[in-house]
Amino acid sequence: MTETCHRRSTCRLCAGSDLQEVLSLEPTPPANAFVPKELVGTEQAVFPLDVFFCGTCGHVQLLDVVDPQLLFENYVYVSGTSPVFVKHFEDYANDVLNTYQPPKGTLVVDIGSNDGTLLSFFQKAGQTVLGIDPAKGISQDATKRGIETWCDFFTPELSAKIKAARGSAHVITANNVFAHADDLVGIVQGIWDLLAPEGVFVFEVSYLVDVFEKTLFDTIYHEHVAYHSVKPLQQFFTDNGMELISAERIDTHGGSLRGVAQLKSGPHSTQPSVDKMIALEASLGLDQAKTFEAFGRHIDEIKAELTGLLKSLKSEDKIIAGFGAPAKATTLMHHFGIGPDIIDFIVDDSPLKQNLYAPGLHIPVLPSQAIYDKKPDAVVILAWNFAEPIMKNHARYLEQGGQFIVPLPKVTLFP
């Protein structure tokens, strides 16, 4: 273990020490650690991807914590490059505004605001907005485009600075970041202090039910230290002066949880959805360690099926490409042993990833035009959660005799 990674010994929700390893994935570099051509010959450091179950509260998590500066300071994922996410955030902002009706002009703070896509919709509706994001380039660009963004990690200390400068926030959001932070207690303490008495904290995270039901093991990577379910979160908020009042399943990232919390004894009533989700989790056995051990065996079955198919194609000298270079592709390719001997190149629509090389495996990432220029026989859709729009946008590739392979939730071929 290097100084850029340490292993904690307690649950990050309840601080319990009854922790059992239930799944061990292949160690990988940080999932977004793309490298330029001049570093292709340099071996990248890899870190453990071992998943633990807390016997005290039932929370599922990584205990190995990679230095967040290493993970996020030069982040390359931006929401605004995906039309699907732009529409999602527009609907999200409207839903929060209609349901909780914060007074016009009041402060909305987004923790891990990325390129400001979500905040832009709150701003258009007349709210004052402030983004918090540790990625230097992305936060600077967001500020230039009119979404003021402070380049920092959200902590109780930063929360106090925001409150002193801007007053309390009526809405605080954290999307696909509430699973990224090791110190969730510190974040919630900061939210508790910054939130107006009638305000709400809204967060989206990958939902453990979906990870389990759809075998979304590739959403397990170092940025995601927590794999949330409702029951442990309900107790966590209660322990920290807040209450979980809503829990909703949404489609993003293959299946996510949108939770809403308020200060204890706040004005909003708790929705039946909270108890409904807890009952669903219990019915699936997500409160038992043995469930996740069986999950590992199912992953092995998918690995055997996909790698068998791809090796068969390569034995016929077929050219195989990957479509999409999301963080999840790092986990999938490393754990399944799909390297440059199988995937010839990857295409991605994000200019931030193009002309770089995939983490650890150093497969080139090219613009999507490459599937027409290089004419691969098959394309594995690594960004499988966008498989439908990808195949729709690239129907011409299929018409020209190409084949798409969707690896998850189950191996599927088109046509």
Image (tube, rainbow, N blue to C red):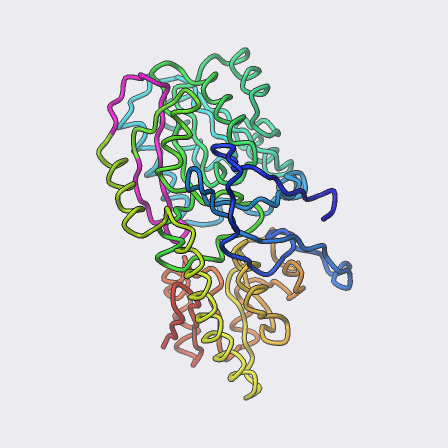
355 or 344: which is nearer to us?
344
On the question of residue 113 being in view, the answer is no
Relative to residue 268, is residue 336 depicted above or below?
A: below
* Quarter-of-image position of residue 203: top left
Image position, residue 391 (x, y; %): 39, 66
Image position, residue 100 (x, y; %): 29, 24
Relative to residue 175, is residue 33 depicted above or below?
A: below
On the question of residue 190 being in view, the answer is yes
Residue drawn at point x = 57 percent, y = 75 percent: 374
* Quarter-of-image position of residue 275: top left
134 or 376: which is nearer to us?
134
Residue drawn at point x = 39 percent, y = 77 percent: 399
Q: Which stretch is magenta?
A: 247-270
Question: Can you name the residue that lies furthest to the front here?
Answer: 18
Please state if 294 lies on the left or on the right of 64 as rendered.
Answer: left
345 or 303: which is nearer to us?
303
How many marks overall? 0
Image position, residue 60 (x, y; %): 46, 45
* Quarter-of-image position of residue 69: top right
Please state if 360 lies on the left or on the right of 408 as rendered.
Answer: right
Residue drawn at point x = 49 percent, y = 63 percent: 382
Image position, residue 114 (x, y; %): 53, 38
Relative to residue 390, is residue 181 depicted above or below?
A: above
Relative to residue 93, is residue 323 depicted above or below?
A: below
13 or 403: which is nearer to us?
13
Q: The C terminus lies in which quarter of the figure? A: bottom left
